[in-house]
Each structure stands twice: as structure tokens, then as C-alpha cells.
Image: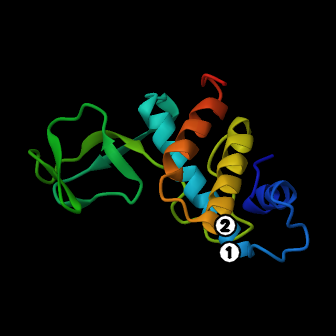
């Protein structure tokens, strides 16, 4: 069964010792799980994980999807600002692109957009984000990405 942000929140609250919901709001947890999903997306895209490829048919001046990261070797399509351009005009072209996940997550009932094998990595990254908020260390993002790389299946656990 797919995991929700509420499932992650219960584990996160145990890990950060906030079972009574005193230190962190549900909104903070939702935001940090969404950010952890986007960070995990970056790690998996850097690994060239095929599960991060999205396929879509587009025509000239089609809006670039919110989750667009970069093309997967694409021609005759290119990006100009907020739109895709094609050399085929109104004839649709199939586009393959790397897509991030985590956009649009806004409530505890939202389903985490990754397989359960990534659940611990997402929870761990969200915990790191919550605890970093207290310290406000702007260099922490690199260590979060390194932790995700190690925790995600196929990563080099250290």
C-alpha cells in the first residue's frame, strides 16, 4: 500500500522526538517531505535512473511541465523559457525528459510519489531538513544529498 505523508510524519516525529507536536507543525513536515522528494529526484536523475523518465506528446509552444528537469536526448524539441518549441509545428512529438517528484504535495493525506523502498531515505532527509531549520546551516543541503545517495537503494552505504 502506498505511503502517505502522514505515515512519514509519524516516523519523523518519533525520530525528532516530537510525538506531542510541540516543535514542528504538520505544515513543516509536509513541506520537508516534499523537499526530500525533490532532492531524491535529483539524486536519481544524476544516477540516470529510468524510473525518473517521463514521456509526453507535445506540440509547438506547449507549456513546460512543472516537474521538468532536463531532456533525455531530445530533438526536434527544445525549451524556450516556459514553453517547448518544436520544428514540427502542430504535429505532436513524443518527448522524453527527466522529471522531478514532490511538486504539489500539500497535505498529510497526499501519497508519497516514490516506491516504498525509498521511504526511509525520504524520512531521513525530511528529518535532516527539520533539524537544520533550527540550526539554519545553508551548507547542509550537500550533506542531505549525500545521505540520500547513500540511503537510496543502489547507493554506496557508508
Q: Position of residue 36 (x, y in %)?
A: 59, 52
Q: Measured along the vertical axis of the image, is residue 151 above or below residue 88?
A: above
Q: Which of 140 and 60 lies nearest the eye of the viewer? A: 140
Q: Secondary structure at mark 1?
A: helix
User: Within the image, what quadrant is residue 26 found in?
Assistant: bottom right
Q: Measured along the vertical axis of the image, is residue 76 above or below residue 33?
A: above
Alpha carbon separation for disc pair 2 and 1: 5 Å
Q: Is residue 74 left or right of residue 122?
A: left
Q: Which residue is mark 1?
A: 27
Q: Position of residue 50 (x, y in %)?
A: 47, 29
Q: Position of residue 53 (x, y in %)?
A: 43, 37
Q: Secondary structure at mark 2?
A: helix
Colour mapping: rainbow
Residues at marks 2 and 1 touching, judged by CB atoms closer than 8 Å? yes
User: Within the image, what quadrant is residue 127 found in?
Assistant: bottom right
Q: Which residue is mark 2?
A: 30
User: Within the image, what quadrant is residue 117 found in?
Assistant: top right
State the residue at coordinates (72%, 50%). 123
Q: Which of 151 and 137 lies nearest the eye of the viewer? A: 137
Residue 50 appears in the picture as rendered: yes
Q: Measured along the vertical axis of the image, is residue 22 above or below residue 148?
A: below
Amino acid at each position: 500500500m502506498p505511503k502517505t505523508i502522514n505515515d512519514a510524519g509519524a516516523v519523523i516525529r518519533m525520530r525528532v522526538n516530537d510525538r506531542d507536536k510541540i516543535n514542528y507543525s504538520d505544515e513543516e513536515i509536509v513541506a520537508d517531505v516534499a523537499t526530500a522528494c525533490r532532492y531524491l529526484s535529483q539524486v536519481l536523475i544524476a544516477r540516470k535512473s529510468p524510473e525518473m523518465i517521463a514521456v509526453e506528446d507535445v506540440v509547438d509552444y506547449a507549456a513546460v511541465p512543472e516537474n521538468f528537469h532536463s531532456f533525455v536526448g531530445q530533438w526536434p524539441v527544445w525549451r524556450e523559457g516556459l514553453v517547448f518549441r518544436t520544428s514540427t509545428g502542430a504535429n505532436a512529438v513524443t518527448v522524453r525528459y527527466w522529471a522531478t517528484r514532490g511538486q504539489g504535495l500539500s497535505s498529510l493525506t497526499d501519497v508519497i510519489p516514490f516506491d516504498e523502498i525509498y521511504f526511509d531515505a525520504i524520512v531521513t532527509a525530511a528529518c535532516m531538513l527539520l533539524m537544520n531549520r533550527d540550526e539554519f546551516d545553508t551548507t547542509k543541503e550537500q550533506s542531505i544529498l549525500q545521505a540520500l545517495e547513500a540511503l537510496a537503494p543502489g547507493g554506496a552505504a557508508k
